[in-house]
Amino acid sequence: MPRAWVGLGSNLGDSRKTLCRAIDELDLLAGTRLAARSHIYRTPPWGQHNQPDFFNAVAELDTILGAERLLDALLALEHRHGRVRRTRWGARTLDLDLLLYAGMVIDTPRLKVPHPRLTMRGFVLVPLAELAPELKVPGRGTVIDLLAHVDIRGIDMVRCA
């Protein structure tokens, strides 16, 4: 069964509660099982700095869904949580990014895996390293090696609401 890693983020509403619920809902996706979940981390905003801090986590999934079908399920889950796409890197109720899928490299108009900015984002690499520090990011190296090259200042572990 393919293994996928999903990044979760939120900075609108009760973000910790939203992430905890969303992680539980990932386990309910058809043909999908939650294999592991990271802690939740409070992180400074990335891209646009004039917005509230984010809460981020990573979920490790086993799924029979193909990568694009999994993406569709993630987008539907975002929509159910009130996600409206207005501004790139802006505030959001829930953001779900397909970070890695079965060790594959995917480059389609709809989907890029590994996620194109995964290697630059401490808020993704910290929770991903918690779950799978030796995981190889195709063409980039291991998660723990990538983490050594990003700024992780201001990233703090928090508990579910």
Image (spheres, rainbow, N blue to C red):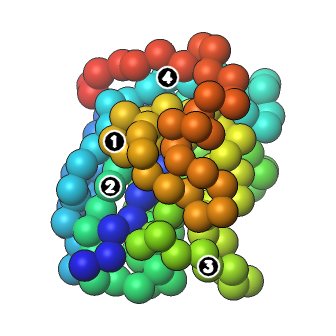
Q: If you read the primary sequence from the N terminus, does the residue marked by circle 3 or circle 2 appear first? A: 2
The amino acid marked with disc number 4 is Arg
- Residue at the disc numbered 1: 131
Q: Could one spot residue 99 in this view of the protein?
A: no
Judge by depth and name the residue closer to the eye, 63 or 10: 63
Q: Quadrant of the N terminus?
A: bottom left
CA separation in Å, label 4 and label 3: 30 Å
- Contact (Cβ within 8 Å) of mark 4 with mark 3: no
- Residue at the disc numbered 2: 60
Q: If you read the primary sequence from the N terminus, does the residue marked by circle 2 or circle 1 appear first? A: 2
Quadrant in the rendering for residue 12: top right
Q: If you read the primary sequence from the N terminus, does the residue marked by circle 4 or circle 3 appear first? A: 4
Q: Quadrant of the C terminus?
A: top left
- Contact (Cβ within 8 Å) of mark 4 with mark 1: no
- Residue at the disc numbered 4: 42
* Above or below 134: residue 113: below
Q: Position of residue 107 (x, y in %)?
A: 69, 80
Q: Position of residue 5 (x, y in %)?
A: 41, 58
Q: Position of residue 83 (x, y in %)?
A: 54, 56
Instruction: Tell me which residue sits at (44%, 26%) in the image.
Output: 41
The amino acid marked with disc number 3 is Ile
Characterize the local packing of mark 1: few (<14), some (14-19) or many (20 or more) Cα atoms within 10 angstroms.
some
Apparent side of residue 104 relative to residue 112 in the rendered image (left or right): left
Instruction: Tell me which residue sits at (59%, 44%) in the image.
Output: 92
Characterize the local packing of mark 3: few (<14), some (14-19) or many (20 or more) Cα atoms within 10 angstroms.
some
- Contact (Cβ within 8 Å) of mark 2 with mark 1: yes
Judge by depth and name the residue closer to the eye, 150 or 72: 150
- Residue at the disc numbered 3: 106
Quadrant in the rendering for residue 158: top left
